[in-house]
Image (tube, helix red, strand yellow):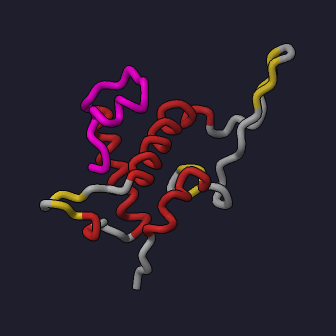
């Protein structure tokens, strides 16, 4: 996994159980590998992959978005009295693998060509 549950809890305050967070971290790790076509073997130290700091923080931001904003997808505008909230629309032009493109930009330097 890119992060351990203990590392993740330093950056995210959530009521999710350790088991759920571990599953999310495994999912994110697989998603990063599939999207970049990179298994990060170049970053191996003593038989373990040590992911770069920007990849770790990118995954933290993805999980924050997952936990805080996933349920707001599809809401274009919400107004209550003088309070107004507008969310962007998730379509093929601004999302990748179900996440906003802006959140996956950290992976661009790690992408490998797939032949």
Horizontal side of 29 relative to 60 (left or right) equals left
Q: Relative to 113, does residue 51 appear above or below in the rendering?
A: above
Which residue is at a point 33% across and 53% down the rendered structure image? 29
| Residue sticking out furthest to the top | 81
Report which quarter residue 94 is drawn in. bottom right
Q: Position of residue 1 (x, y in %)?
A: 26, 49
Horizontal side of 86 relative to 53 (left or right) equals right
| Residue sticking out furthest to the left | 46
Which residue is at a point 37% across and 56% down the rendered structure image? 52
Report which quarter residue 70 is drawn in. top right
Horizontal side of 99 relative to 80 (left or right) equals left
Q: Position of residue 40 (x, y in %)?
A: 30, 66
Q: Is residue 66 magenta?
A: no
Which residue is at a point 62% across and 33% down the rendered structure image? 72
Q: Relative to 37, does residue 57 appear above or below in the rendering?
A: above
Span colored in magenta: 1-19
Quadrant in which the C terminus appears? bottom left
């Amino acid at each position: 996994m890119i992060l351990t549950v203990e590392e993740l809890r330093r950056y995210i305050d959530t009521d999710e159980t350790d088991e759920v967070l571990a599953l999310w971290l495994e999912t994110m790790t697989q998603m990063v590998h599939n999207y970049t076509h990179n298994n990060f073997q170049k970053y191996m130290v003593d038989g373990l992959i040590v992911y770069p700091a920007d990849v770790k923080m990118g995954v933290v931001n993805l999980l924050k978005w997952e936990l805080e904003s996933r349920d707001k997808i599809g809401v274009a505008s919400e107004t209550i009295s003088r309070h107004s909230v507008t969310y962007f629309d998730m379509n093929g032009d601004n999302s990748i693998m179900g996440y906003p493109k802006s959140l996956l930009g950290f992976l661009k330097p790690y992408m490998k060509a797939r032949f």
